[in-house]
Image (spheres, rainbow, N blue to C red):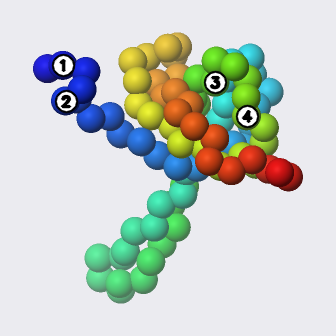
Amino acid sequence: MTQETQSRRTLVGRVVSDKMDKSISVLVETREQHPLYKKYLRRSKKFHAHDADNACQIGDLVRIEECRPISKTKTWRLVEVIERVGA
């Protein structure tokens, strides 16, 4: 399988921590419907992502992509900053 045909999961979320060097913590919120009551529930999960240039700040809206394990907890990398906070 070549690199072009392999699709990788991408997620969009908000940066909640940028205290680490070359790493960010991203909160991704999803909406899912309850099987019986049909009410929409908000689910959230945090992912650690690799930010090589330390480009992100807390509050930025970013797109992250799945990648090979970079460390024990980092298996995502920053693709783009969609919206900057305060700009």
**CB atoms at circles 3 and 1 under 8 Å apart?**
no
- Mark 1 or 4, closer to the camera: 1
Q: Quadrant of residue 8 in the image?
A: top left
Determine whether, in the image, residue 78 is placed left or right of residue 58.
left
The residue to which callout 2 is attached is 5
Whether 52 is drawn above or below 83: the answer is above
Q: CA distance from mark 1 to mark 4?
A: 31 Å
Amino acid type assigned to the residue bearing label 3 in the image: Asp
Residue with the mark numbered 4: 56
Count of numbered circles in the view? 4
Q: CA distance from mark 3 to mark 1?
A: 25 Å
- Indicate which disc residue 51 carries: 3
Residue at 14 percent across and 20 percent down: it is 1
- Looking at this view, is 6 or 40 the one in front? 6
Query: Could you tell which of marks 4 and 3 lies nearer the N-terminus?
Result: 3
- Which callout, 2 or 3, points at the residue further toward the start of the chain? 2
Mark 3 or mark 1: which is in front? Answer: 1
